[in-house]
């Protein structure tokens, strides 16, 4: 049960751009926003709960219509809002020392940070009774219509087969087509003209560590973190060590590969509480030391300055193209 997140290149880079510009520090100026950051915000970089709920409702309506065409009834689900500790006005900023001291990196502290992942109300599938009244064959047909049928690969018959499943909305049933229509169709990210920008953005941010001032700050950080008793060369390496350990805990909580159906049905997937408590303590200690070393090394300011320089270079080259894509999308709506 590896808990990882995979983002499309553009989304990941956009997130990095926005994060880099809010990373704390005081250079080049507290209120200076990079041109790419401003652009991503304009085209949907900010999060609005009401808009997200409206989109989810539209997805469910489209699913219901699609399922009806397939001969099934489907009651749309209502949006499930996740309550977050961070939503409070007094919650610390993600990059602040207070956040590090309370939540570390937000890895093993997820239950504290996000309120255990629920809003206090148990979700009830409005289609559960309808599906329960079906025969086994009808249930299979229902879920195939809803989710599609991923290709099955038998590793015993073909040991060299690629076990990675590449998502394709056209093969993901009514849910896939509905999500594509609401979230993906006519997005500027699909435009072929974005490919060169995507690749160059990725390269720029991969090479950003070569910035002289950022490299100097990172070396100071490494010396500081070593004095604190840790053996890491970069802040990313320090943070990743926690996520790697967290993944290991969840993987150890997974059932054995040869488990029977009965064993799977009764298996407790909860991670070891003692290991999680130990990791939480370790995470907060490391994140706090990490923050102190970043602060003393001028790392935040160096990241912000390097990020702003990258944004300005990319915007000078691609800014007009990005604006044209937005105009094109607006005209087609």
Image (spheres, rainbow, N blue to C red):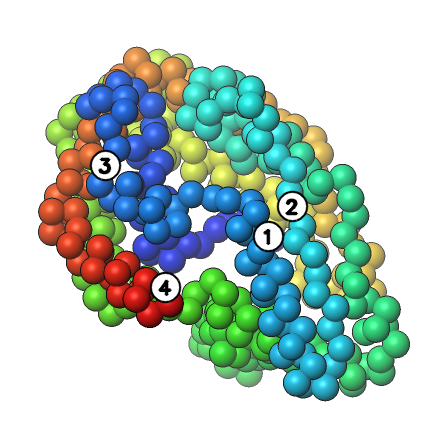
Spatial CA distance of label 3 from label 2 is 31 Å
Mark before the other along the chain sequence, 1 or 3? 3
Q: Nearer the viewer, residue 69 or 112?
A: 69
Return the mark for residue 187.
4
Confirm or deny contact between disc 1 and disc 4 (CB under 8 A).
no
| Quadrant the C terminus occupies | bottom left
Q: CA distance from mark 4 to mark 3?
A: 22 Å
Q: CA distance from mark 1 to mark 3?
A: 30 Å
Find residue 53 and name its label. 1
The residue shown at (44%, 54%) is 6
Residue 220: x %, y % from top left: 24, 19
| Mark 4 burial class by Cα count in 10 Å: few <14, some 14-19, many 20+ | few
Dot 2: within a 10 Å radius of its alpha carbon, few (fewer than 14), some, or many (20 or more) residues? few
42 to the left or right of 184: left
**Label 2 sits on residue:** 81
Give the tally of numbered discs.
Answer: 4
Which element is circle 3 on? Answer: loop
Mark 1 or mark 4: whose residue is earlier in sequence = 1
Instruction: Using a 10 Å C-alpha cutoff, classify the residue at mark 3 as few (fewer than 14 neighbours), some (14 to 19) or many (20 or more).
Output: many
Distance from disc 1 to disc 2, alpha carbons, whole Å, reads 8 Å
């Amino acid at each position: 049960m590896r808990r990882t997140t995979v983002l499309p290149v553009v989304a990941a880079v956009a997130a990095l751009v926005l994060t880099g510009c809010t990373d704390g520090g005081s250079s080049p100026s507290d209120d200076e926003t990079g041109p790419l950051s401003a652009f991503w915000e304009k085209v949907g970089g900010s999060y609005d709960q009401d808009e997200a709920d409206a989109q989810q409702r539209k997805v469910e309506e489209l699913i219901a219509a699609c399922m009806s065409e397939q001969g099934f009834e489907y009651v749309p689900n209502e949006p499930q809002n996740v309550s977050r500790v961070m939503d409070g006005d007094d919650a610390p900023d993600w990059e602040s020392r207070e956040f590090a001291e309370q939540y570390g990196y937000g890895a093993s502290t997820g239950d504290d940070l996000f309120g255990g992942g629920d809003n206090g109300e148990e979700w009830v599938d409005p289609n559960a009774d309808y599906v329960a009244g079906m025969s086994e064959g009808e249930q299979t047909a229902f879920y195939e219509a809803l989710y599609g049928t991923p290709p099955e690969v038998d590793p015993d018959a073909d040991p060299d087969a690629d076990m990675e499943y590449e998502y394709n909305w056209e093969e993901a049933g009514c849910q896939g087509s509905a999500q594509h229509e609401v979230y993906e169709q006519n997005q500027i990210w699909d435009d072929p003209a974005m490919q060169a920008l995507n690749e160059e953005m990725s390269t720029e941010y991969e090479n950003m560590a070569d910035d002289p001032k950022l490299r100097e700050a990172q070396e100071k950080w490494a010396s500081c973190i070593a004095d604190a008793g840790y053996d890491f060369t970069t802040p990313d390496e320090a943070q990743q060590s926690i996520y790697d350990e967290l993944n290991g805990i969840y993987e150890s909580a997974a059932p054995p590969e040869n488990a029977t159906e009965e064993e799977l049905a009764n298996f407790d997937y909860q991670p070891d509480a003692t290991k999680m408590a130990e990791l939480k303590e370790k995470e907060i200690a490391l994140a706090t030391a990490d923050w102190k070393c970043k602060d003393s090394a001028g790392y935040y300011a160096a990241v912000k300055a390097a990020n702003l320089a990258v944004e300005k270079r990319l915007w000078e080259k691609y800014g007009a193209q990005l604006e044209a894509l937005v105009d094109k999308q607006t005209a087609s709506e």
